[in-house]
Amino acid sequence: MPSIRSRLPHPKTDRPPSAGGAPAPATGRTYRRRQFLFRTGAAIALPLIVPPAVLGRAGGVAPSNRITFGGIGMGNRALFILPNFLAFPDVQFVAVSDAREDRRQVSRKAVDAHYHNQDCRVHSDFRELLAQKDIDAVLIATGNRWHATASMFAARAGKDIYCEKPISLTIREGRQLVELCRRYGTIYQAGTQRRSTESYQFAREMVRQGRIGKVHTVEMQVWTGGTVPHQKATPVPPGWDYDQWLGPVQWRPFVPGRVNGWTCFWDTGEGMHTDMGTHYTDQMQWVLGTDATGPVEFEALDLVWPNPKEWMSETALTGTFKCRYANGVSGILYQRKGFTDRYIRYLGDAGWVQVDDETDVVTAEPKSILQLKRAGGVSWADAGTHIRNFLEAIRSRRPTLCHPEVAHRAQTICEATTISARLDRKLKWDPVKEVFDCDEANRMLYREPRAPWRVM
């Protein structure tokens, strides 16, 4: 049966080719179920009695109306978010891929246990998964080094994409992903799910309604960065395709600390404020109404780096990362304290409103603002609403809440302040041309991927 995407209206006339290289089915083409069965001859094989759930009755969803998924990168984050996907009856996971055998098998068993069968296919190379014509969309939950590259491969294969943050690890590859998704009409949702969370939506509404006056500063906080002690290279563990695990980054010997602590290195993670900070810069952009643009100045201050005599990790432990918009509004991202101390606060000339990320609690001044908030609401830890927005976008072919341009602009702030930190200088930025006022900084806009992982 054709994938659901081939049977939906599509805004583009230049549909991407299917994974096998053949032209994609004509857009908007639909079949009544009986017509399809007779045309394929499948009606002959039908049993006399068909369970109601198979036909989409009794609360079930007919197979022809399900969105089929494959998973790329099935580690801890994927297993955490997978139940949110499986909870929807119109989602059907059919395949998983990972460079590690243990993760392939754990995720396969999780999918099979949910469906009470043994149908989930397993791939060590995600390109084999993308070549499957019955897959409509993919969940990408790899390490950060893979997000942009895997997403571009998926878009080129004609798949819609839900990808965990951050969208990229360089500004230029983020822009490449935006352009590729536009070219192929890809529906893309970044996993910055706080846009779908009631507490963050409430804070946005209070700011947009002028409840705290004119905003002048946005404060954000992530936790202190990690450290990795010096270690020697070891043999690659059994069941690992280490070359596939590295993907587009420079080849290095297998060092357990570097692999397990990949967030702490420039080529694989770029540090805590780049990895986690995009959740809050995304909120700042959303609330300020700057999704299509961004700040014009970046600066990194008060940086504390790991001692190279003790640690092999490269990224800052603590620091203050600042940006300024053309209208004078400042964004300040602190990297400090502990994991449970995360927050975002909007400060205006008549008050402030804050969301505590760990507890989902909203505080404000004046306190009368809180009387407007409804009780309850789903926290950011439940990505179900965000996934539902993605599923509806797949069917309507309309942009998601966190489409590629939105996600790229938010991530650009994190990457630009990272470049400022590495160069130890303030940088001016043109958000239209996406270039700095510094040649050395512009050379850091892109890193050439290792062969064969260049997409554009």
Image (cartoon, rainbow, N blue to C red):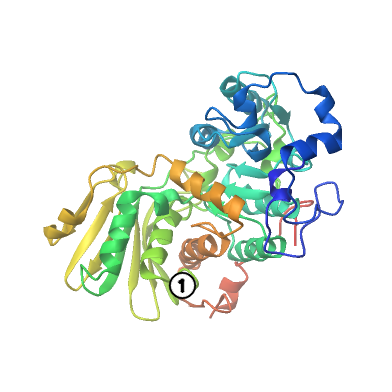
Mark 1 surroundings within 10 Å by alpha-carbon count, few (fewer than 14), some (14 through 19), many (20 or more): many
User: Compared with residue 319, is residue 110 higher up or lower down, i.e. above or below?
Assistant: above
**Residue under the point 41% across and 39% down:** 382
Question: Looking at the rendering, in which quadrant would you find the N terminus?
Answer: top right
Q: What percent of the width, then of the height, locates residue 263?
A: 51, 46
**Residue under the point 41% across and 64% down:** 286
16 lies left or right of 267 = right
Q: Is residue 267 visible?
A: no
Q: Is residue 4 visible?
A: yes
447 lies left or right of 381 = right
List the residue tagged with mark 1: 294
Quadrant position of residue 280: bottom left
User: Compared with residue 45, is residue 390 higher up or lower down, i.e. above or below?
Assistant: below
Quadrant position of residue 215: bottom left
Nearest to the observer: residue 350 or residue 39: 39
Nearest to the observer: residue 35 or residue 67: 35
**Residue under the point 60% across and 32% down:** 56
41 lies left or right of 426 = right
**Residue under the point 53% across and 36% down:** 85
Element under disc 1 = loop
Q: What percent of the width, then of the height, locates residue 232?
A: 61, 34
Q: What percent of the width, then of the height, locates residue 158?
A: 73, 52
Q: Amino acid at mark 1?
A: Gly
Q: What percent of the width, then of the height, locates residue 447?
A: 66, 61
Question: Looking at the rendering, in which quadrant would you find the C terminus?
Answer: bottom right
Q: How many discs mark residues in the rendered view?
A: 1
